[in-house]
């Protein structure tokens, strides 16, 4: 049985998540509490997975995340947000969050995502994946370790990695590169193996840190874009989620 703690300042969200997850035979919501009770409840009930609101009026979700990650037997923590353009995305992931989910995630997907988290996988809304690699992380600094890892990839595998990092599902990658879905899955498996990671999210972060996703010099930075430009980009950033979530083995 997977023991889950839901932490959110809104009672409606706590009730909704509890109802959805308790309907699964292998998941039990042991408690649903506001932010101020999160750390104490984790110490008392020792949940396997914590779904944690990143923005709460009484306490900052990132502060709670840091406290939970510092525990001897820290639970797996996935952050919840109402907005796909939450500026805390990169900070939460760098602080040890195992995923980042929108509160309007398809209810049918929630139990599957919790199971993935409990197995040590990483889950991320496809819209959030796009944002992680398109402006929230620092493109200007290349990490030598990431450069060495991506150097193991073939040219085709690097192309697949870049599209993975943009949040594309295998079928979409195949259309872009004129490959069958089965061939793409094989490349994805090779990419994850060579990068020594288990999820598409982790691979995307390595690609970013290796400089594979750096914008061209002529492209304005996210902060330099005008509001009108952001508005024109909105349809792209809010494309429908793909069938294959960004996570571990299940999305290969």
Image: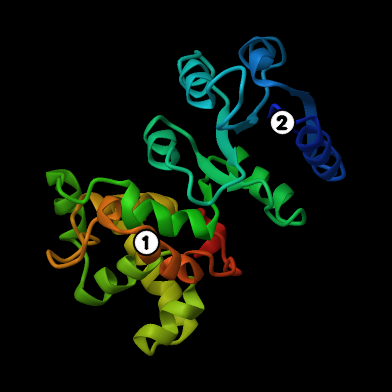
Q: Position of residue 212 (x, y in %)?
A: 21, 61
Seen in the picture, residue 18 relative to 165 is either above or below; the reply is above
Nearer mark to the viewer, of 2 and 1: 1
Residue matched to label 1: 165
Q: Position of residue 31 (x, y in %)?
A: 78, 23
**Which residue appears at 33% of the width and 63% of the height?**
191
Distance between the alpha carbons at the discs numbered 2 and 1? 29 Å
Query: Of the numbered discs in the image, which one, if any, rests on residue 151?
Result: none
Q: Position of residue 111 (x, y in %)?
A: 73, 48
Q: Position of residue 148 (x, y in %)?
A: 14, 52
Circle 1 SS class: helix
Identify which residue, 157 or 83, lies in the foreground. 83
Outermost residue to the bottom: 178
Circle 2 SS class: strand
**Left-right relation of 159 to 71:** left
**Which residue appears at 53% of the width and 20% of the height?**
64
Tag 2: Cα neighbours inside 10 Å, few (<14), some, or many (≥20)? Answer: many
Tag 1: Cα neighbours inside 10 Å, few (<14), some, or many (≥20)? Answer: many
Residue matched to label 2: 4
């Amino acid at each position: 049985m997977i023991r889950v703690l839901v932490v959110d300042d809104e009672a409606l969200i706590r009730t909704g998540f509890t109802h959805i997850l308790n309907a699964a035979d292998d998941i039990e919501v042991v408690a649903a509490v506001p932010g101020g009770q999160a750390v104490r409840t984790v110490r008392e009930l020792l949940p396997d997975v914590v779904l944690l609101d990143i923005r709460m009026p009484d306490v900052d979700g990132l502060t709670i995340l840091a406290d939970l990650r510092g525990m001897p037997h820290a639970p797996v923590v996935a952050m919840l947000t109402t907005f796909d353009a939450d500026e805390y995305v990169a900070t939460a992931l760098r602080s040890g969050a195992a995923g980042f989910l929108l509160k309007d995630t398809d209810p049918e997907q929630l139990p599957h995502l919790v199971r993935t988290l409990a197995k040590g996988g990483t889950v991320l809304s496809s819209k959030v994946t796009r944002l992680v690699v398109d402006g929230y992380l620092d493109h200007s600094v290349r990490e030598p370790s990431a450069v060495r890892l991506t150097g193991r990839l073939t040219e085709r595998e690097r192309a697949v990695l870049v599209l993975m990092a943009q949040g594309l599902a295998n079928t979409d990658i195949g259309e872009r590169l004129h490959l069958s879905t089965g061939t793409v899955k094989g490349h994805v498996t090779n990419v994850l193996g060579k990068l020594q990671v288990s999820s598409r999210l982790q691979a995307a972060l390595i690609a970013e840190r290796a400089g594979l996703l750096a914008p061209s010099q002529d492209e304005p930075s996210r902060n330099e874009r005008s509001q009108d430009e952001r508005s024109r980009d909105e349809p792209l950033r809010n494309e429908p989620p793909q069938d294959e979530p960004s996570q571990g083995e299940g999305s290969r």
